[in-house]
């Protein structure tokens, strides 16, 4: 039997839902106030002070050669080299005493020109893992016909704790290694070693990234910026204006580093790249004022950060127009001085790689607003194509029933996007508006308002829809009772029901 | 003895799917003690569907509006459709005596049996082939829908006995059945209501669905086993019109027990469908459709369980009265009914004319069964001393009038005498 097909006209609900403001506003954290009105709580990270800013451990290579001044006959098993070496990192102004390595390696390469196998014991007494020092025993092949025996191996130092105080614990930034080289006990019983029978040992520490560091991090000044940070709260807004009744804004600094600092926020800009409008924050209590940041403390591996908080209100700043500019970028310039009072910790500054000094902005924006043609646009994955490639839908009518319980009108348009996100067509061929719900004298919604939007879809448009995988949803909002502010309450919902009256070809499998 | 054997086989297998036309062949010589046959038949008929529609359906073509309208014009409140496809082989023996029993004949047969039938309302046809849009604001009554499909393989052993005192002949056949595939839908109640504006659809249903293990299909699948019995009786008598024979045959009285991997659903529910639920308009496709694949929907709407069940196979009753009017002409009146198969009582008349010593032709005309008026033709020929051939059709009306009839069928057999 084949797979017959025939056309039908199907009248069916496609999707339905009751959406509250949580389902409508993207990427927002909404909270409910005591009066059930809603507010947006938004946290935007502005800047992180990383460990790299304070210090960086560079790759270090130490090459040493060993040779006898005159030819000697040496018994096998005899120690040929037995010495210790210290390597000091150049870290201007920074005096590290301890580092726990997050990731990093040591490369150990030996050229053996002695005509006998050499046995090496290489250790880093100051590098311990679980209390056990790093140590390796290796045999380096003998030279053959003048060609030196070669050993070259890389060892992982991840997790090792490095004591950087040297062999006598009176140094800083110093790695201490030791080397014991012996003539292998393999026969013959003795070996003649000539002056040219040297050993060349290369020892490289590379890609060392600390997880934890302790010491004195120095008294340095860092200038950060001018730079920009993304501000995602309004990134789907593509047009219109928004007036907010209140804005509660806090500039916060969290310091989990065992380091005193003094910060100056020299500039903070609200930049709307869509309108090319930029507005500088005017806040005498914050901008250009020294902010003293106390060091964090630690107990074991537990860190207790310190915090600085600067509330910005409509009375102490221009924060309301700053936000109403609907920024998508925040520009900033910051100056940070570390240890402004010197080494007051007795070289007990500390830092964890995953605990960074953060400057952020926390906002609480009550959803009491005036939206005028406020236009949100979002790209959605949407494909009606069948995995088999069958195009069963040909044409028809989509009817949107929207029972709106929000105090705003919403005009909807759907754009068909190609693979390059370019608009190839729109769904609605005419203006449509989901009508706002009726409100009372307190601007509170008292009932829902049903809007029916009919959308004929031609065969040509349906064919076009089969080719796309994404659509852009564009919604334009206008709040009720302008210029008065209206609040959005948690019990506000919109019931949507999309019905299809579709010409559908059934393919019987 | 020859006629006894052949007539008995006729009764035994009369309308028991093909054996009737295969075994009933009076051209088998008296001296033949053993013969074998391969045979096959297929037939389709329907009260509303026409053969144009059925041809497009079976060949996988697009069924256009004219074709659908042609069927709609023939559709009534209750409509029926049925199909059978059978083929097999048998070997028959007629020893002079066996275990001191005389006038006994025996046979063994192996066949593949397939049966489909359905009963549906006009609303069912309209919704299925036109969609539900025309039912906006009203109910489509799909109630009393019934569909059965069964395929099984049959190993049959049988005998016939002639009562020499009164020429009464009777016989029995015993079959072991291997159940391959079964599907059944019975909707005692099925009402589909589409709201005027399409915002919801209600489906109020009380139905049972049974289906064999979907993982094991094909002729090798052993999804169940069972047994069946055939009984026949033939009584010659003389009438003022000529020599006559009354035959009564009941075949395929039995059942198959399908194994516990079979799927079963007994549902009495009201489904209220308002579309897929939107959870987030910014993640529409994933949040709405990710978890609503075909399987998950099916498991929610129709949560099948697994269990073994028994199925009574369609059983056939045939009563016929045959009269030999002249040396060349024979007329048979037949009444036939198939139980458990949405079948209407079939009455037909069959005329057979002997063209010569080696060939004969036949024609039937009747009413009922899965269709309405139906007709058939047949041709029998003896080739040489050892071969007998039959070609015919129980339904030719669909070939002749594809717009107004559905019945189509073909049957054929080849017998080799030893």
Image (cartoon, coloured by chain):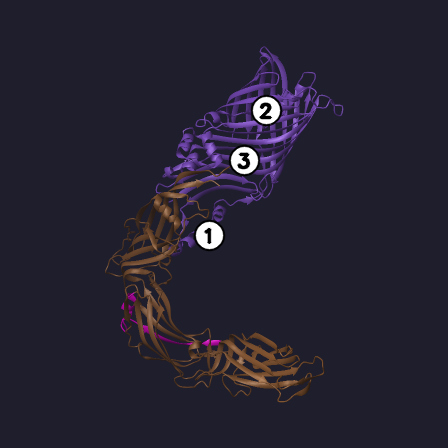
Chain colours: A brown, B purple
Q: Is residue B286 left or right of residue B335?
A: left
Residue found at x 60% / y 76%? A151
Q: Are marks 2 and 1 in contact (CB under 8 Å)?
A: no
For label 2, the SS is strand
Q: Which residues are magenta?
A: A302-325
**Chain ID, mark 1:** B
Q: CA distance from mark 3 to mark 1?
A: 32 Å
Q: Give the residue at the far top of this rendering.
A: B240
Q: Is residue B402 above or below residue B224?
A: above
For label 1, the SS is loop
Question: What residue is shown with label 3?
Answer: B149
Among numbered discs 2 and 3, the one appearing first in the sequence: 3
Q: CA distance from mark 2 to mark 3?
A: 28 Å
Q: Is residue A391 above or below residue B113?
A: below
Among numbered discs 3 and 1, the one appearing first in the sequence: 3
Q: Give the residue at the far left of this rendering.
A: A483
Query: Of discs 2 and 1, which sits in the foreground?
Result: 2
The 10 Å Cα crowd at callout 1, few under 14, some 14 to 19, many 20 or more, is few
The 10 Å Cα crowd at callout 3, few under 14, some 14 to 19, many 20 or more, is many
Q: Give the residue at the far bottom of this rendering.
A: A70
For label 3, the SS is strand
Counting from the top left corner in percent of width and height, residue B285 is at: 41, 53
From this viewpoint, is residue A133 visible? no
Question: What residue is shown with label 2?
Answer: B390
Residue A307 part of the magenta segment: yes
Q: CA distance from mark 2 to mark 1?
A: 57 Å
Question: What residue is shown with label 1?
Answer: B291
**Chain ID, mark 2:** B
State the mark number for residue B355: none
Q: Is residue B287 above or below residue A154?
A: above
Counting from the top left corner in percent of width and height, residue B223 is at: 60, 40
């Amino acid at each position: 039997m084949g797979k017959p097909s025939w056309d039908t006209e199907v009248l069916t609900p496609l999707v339905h839902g009751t959406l509250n403001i949580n389902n409508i506003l993207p990427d927002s954290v909404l909270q409910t106030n005591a009066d059930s009105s809603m507010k947006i709580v938004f946290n935007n990270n502005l800047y992180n002070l990383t460990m790299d800013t304070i210090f960086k451990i560079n790759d270090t290579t130490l090459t040493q050669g060993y040779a006898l001044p005159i030819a000697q006959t040496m018994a096998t098993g005899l120690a040929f080299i037995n010495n210790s070496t210290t390597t000091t990192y150049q870290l201007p102004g920074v005096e590290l005493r301890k580092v726990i390595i997050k990731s990093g390696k040591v490369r150990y390469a030996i050229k053996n020109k002695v005509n006998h196998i050499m046995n090496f014991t290489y250790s880093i007494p100051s590098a311990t893992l679980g209390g056990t020092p790093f140590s390796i025993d290796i045999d380096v092949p003998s030279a053959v016909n003048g060609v030196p025996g070669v050993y070259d191996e890389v060892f992982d130092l991840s997790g090792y704790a490095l004591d950087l105080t040297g062999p006598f614990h009176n140094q800083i930034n110093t790695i201490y290694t030791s080397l014991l080289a012996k003539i292998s006990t393999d026969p013959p019983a003795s070996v003649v070693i000539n002056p040219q029978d040297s050993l060349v040992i290369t020892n490289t520490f590379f890609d060392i990234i600390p997880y934890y560091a302790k010491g004195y991090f120095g008294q340095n000044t860092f200038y950060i910026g001018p730079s920009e940070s993304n501000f995602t709260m309004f990134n789907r807004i593509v047009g219109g204006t928004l007036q907010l009744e209140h804005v509660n804004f806090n500039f916060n600094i969290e310091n989990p580093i065992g380091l005193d600092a003094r910060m100056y926020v020299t500039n903070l800009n609200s930049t709307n790249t869509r309108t090319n409008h930029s507005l500088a924050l005017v806040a005498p209590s914050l901008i250009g004022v020294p902010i003293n940041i106390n060091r964090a403390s630690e107990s074991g591996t537990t860190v207790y950060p310190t915090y600085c908080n600067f509330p910005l209100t409509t009375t102490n700043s221009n924060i309301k127009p700053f936000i109403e500019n609907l920024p998508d970028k925040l520009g900033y310039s910051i100056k940070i001085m570390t240890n402004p009072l010197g080494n007051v910790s007795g070289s007990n500054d500390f830092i964890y790689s995953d605990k960074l000094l953060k400057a952020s902005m926390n906002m609480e924006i009550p959803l009491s607003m005036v939206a005028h043609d406020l236009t949100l646009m979002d790209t959605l994955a949407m494909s009606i194509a069948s995995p088999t490639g069958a195009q069963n839908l040909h044409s028809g009518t989509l009817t949107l029933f929207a029972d709106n319980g929000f105090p705003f009108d919403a005009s909807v348009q759907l754009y068909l996007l190609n693979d390059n996100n370019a608009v190839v067509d729109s769904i609605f061929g005419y203006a449509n508006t989901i009508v706002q719900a009726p409100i009372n004298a307190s601007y509170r919604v008292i009932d829902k308002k049903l809007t029916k939007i009919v959308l004929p879809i031609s065969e040509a448009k349906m064919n076009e829809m089969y080719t796309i995988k994404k659509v852009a949803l564009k919604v334009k909002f206008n709040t009720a009772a302008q210029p008065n502010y209206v609040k959005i309450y948690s019990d506000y919902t919109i019931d949507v029901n999309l019905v299809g009256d579709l010409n559908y070809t059934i393919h019987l499998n | 003895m020859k006629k006894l054997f052949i007539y008995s086989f006729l009764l035994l297998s009369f309308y028991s799917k093909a054996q009737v036309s295969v075994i009933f062949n009076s051209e088998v010589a008296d001296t033949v003690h053993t013969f074998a046959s391969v045979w096959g038949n297929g037939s389709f008929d329907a009260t509303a569907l026409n053969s144009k529609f059925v041809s497009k359906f079976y060949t996988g073509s697009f069924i256009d509006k004219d074709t659908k309208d042609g069927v709609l014009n023939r559709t009534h409140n209750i409509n029926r459709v049925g199909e059978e496809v059978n083929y097999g082989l048998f070997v028959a023996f007629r020893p002079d005596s066996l275990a001191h029993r005389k006038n006994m004949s025996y046979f063994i047969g192996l066949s593949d049996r397939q049966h489909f039938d359905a009963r549906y309302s006009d609303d069912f046809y309209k919704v299925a082939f036109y969609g539900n849009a025309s039912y906006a604001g009203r109910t489509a009554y799909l109630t009393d829908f019934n569909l059965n499909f069964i395929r099984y393989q049959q190993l049959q052993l049988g005998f016939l006995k002639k009562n020499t005192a009164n020429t009464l002949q009777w016989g029995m056949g015993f079959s072991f059945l291997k159940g391959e595939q079964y599907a059944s839908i019975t909707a005692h109640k099925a009402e589909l209501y589409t709201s005027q504006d399409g915002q919801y659809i209600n489906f109020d249903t009380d139905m049972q669905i049974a289906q064999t293990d979907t993982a094991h299909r094909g002729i090798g699948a052993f999804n169940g086993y069972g047994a069946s019995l055939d009984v026949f009786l033939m009584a010659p008598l003389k009438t003022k019109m000529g020599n006559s024979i009354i035959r009564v045959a009941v075949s395929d009285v039995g059942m198959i027990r399908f194994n516990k991997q079979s799927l079963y659903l007994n549902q009495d529910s009201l489904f209220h469908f308002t579309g897929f639920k939107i959870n987030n308009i910014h993640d529409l496709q994933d949040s709405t459709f990710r978890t609503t694949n075909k399987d998950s929907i099916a498991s929610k709407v129709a949560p099948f369980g697994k269990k073994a069940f028994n199925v009574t196979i369609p059983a056939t009753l045939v009563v016929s009265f045959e009269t030999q009017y002249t040396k060349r002409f024979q007329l048979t009146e037949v009444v036939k009914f198939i139980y458990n198969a949405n079948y209407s009582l079939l009455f037909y008349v069959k005329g057979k004319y002997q063209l010569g010593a080696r060939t004969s032709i036949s024609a039937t005309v009747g009413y009922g069964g899965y269709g309405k008026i139906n007709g058939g033709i047949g041709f029998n020929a003896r080739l040489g001393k050892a071969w007998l051939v039959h070609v015919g059709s129980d339904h030719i009306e669909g070939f002749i009038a594809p717009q107004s009839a559905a019945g189509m069928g073909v049957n054929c057999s080849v017998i080799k005498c030893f």
